[in-house]
Image (cartoon, rainbow, N blue to C red):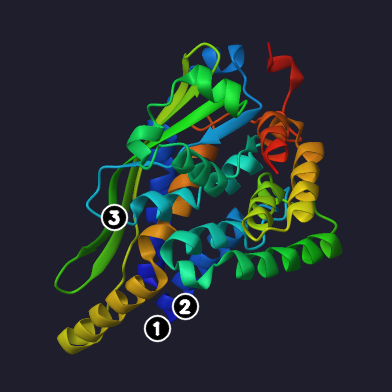
Amino acid sequence: MKARIALLTVVVSLLSGCVVPTQYYWGQYENQVYLMYKAPDKATAEIQVIVLESDIEVARSEDKPLAPGFYAHLGFLYFQLGQLDDARRSFEIEKSTFPESSVLMDRFIEKL
Amino acid sequence: MQKATLFIWGIVLLFGLVGCQTVPKDYTLFHDYQPRSVLVLPPLNESVDESATYGYLSTVSQPLGEMGYYVYPVAVIDQFLKENGMPTPGEMHQVPLDKISEIIGADAVLYIVIREYGNKYQILSSKAVVSVSARLVDVKSGVEIWSQDTRLESASNNGGGGLAGMLVGALVDQVLNSTLDAPHNLSRLVNTTLISTPNQGLLYGPNHPEFSEGTEK
């Protein structure tokens, strides 16, 4: 039993040693992508918007930038829900935060 | 106590072996075509598990983004390509690079092939296995600037308690694996290993604090 505890301690300390603080706030973004395909009824556009909007609040409170792709994904959800102004605003934020996304974001904005 | 000592030695040995095995990659082409943005296409699935493509796709953005690259929104790209007449990863992987440059504007494309994905059920235990091959291709020139294979198995521990205990352990383990989607969770580790292992993974991208301008040509 003692050996098991020692083993567990080693594993835990190794794992925690590997945790590096992230540059971006990722929140539920990737998990929503996962659910979209795995359990679409649990990740409808409506549900995802609620989840991701709350991620924005957390990111703000932690003073961390949101992950690349986050606002583009959110903009696409707004677009699907017909909230075109919100979609445009999200695509603009993605573009100004990550100029690398300009070509694609301009294409999406043009289509709105 | 002896077990624990053995375990520690095992870890030390493992790190030692990993250290020996890794001949640093030649990053000349990577430096020559240093990308800023990476387009991740839905992986091609060679495994028998239908959920592999998207179970895996949803684990790529974070390690790649944290390495300092702009990562296009993977699900949006998937929907966008589907709407434009490419319903499967096979077709998406065939999109000509000049089209990708024109329509999306990516510097590089990450092509992933999933070789193995799923749970291996044995009589008394089960373990998840995920194995992938990845290639990073410069969009403007078509030059492959990096490639790497990674294969990982999750360990499943069913020690103690005799045969009855082992059977219960196996049962619990299989239930846990299906509930928590073990291959998907293992994919995160596969990706981090694939992308972030020093001298094997990607170099830091321009959005990483440790990216050195001097290495960019």
Q: Answer whether residue B201 is visible to the viewer in this image.
A: yes
Image quadrant for the N terminus of chain A?
bottom left
Distance (Cα) linking label 3 and label 1:
41 Å
Q: In this view, does B88 lie to the left or right of B33?
A: left
- Mark 2 Cα within 10 Å, few/some/many (few <14, many 20+)? few
Check residue A1 in the rendering and tell me which mark sits there, or answer none.
Answer: 1
Residue highlighted by disc 3: B50
Q: How many labels does the image show?
A: 3
Residue highlighted by disc 2: A5
Q: Is residue B63 left or right of residue B152?
A: right
The residue at 74%/53% (across/down) is: A84
Do the residues at discs 1 and 2 belong to one chain? yes
Mark 3, mark 2: which one is toward the viewer? Answer: 3
Image quadrant for the C terminus of chain A?
top right
- Mark 3 Cα within 10 Å, few/some/many (few <14, many 20+)? few
Q: Where is residue B91 in the image (x, y as percent from the top left)?
A: 35, 33
Q: Position of residue A108 (x, y in %)?
A: 67, 39
Chain letter for the residue marked with disc 1 in the picture: A
The residue at 36%/59% (across/down) is: B183
Q: In this view, does B32 lie above or below B69?
A: above
Mark 3, mark 1: which one is toward the viewer? Answer: 3
Which amino acid lies under the numbered mark 1 shown in the image of this protein?
Met
Q: Is residue B186 above or below residue B35?
A: below
Q: Do the residues labelled 1 and 2 touch (CB within 8 Å)?
A: yes
The residue at 61%/39% (across/down) is: B72
Q: In this view, does B88 lie to the left or right of B70?
A: left
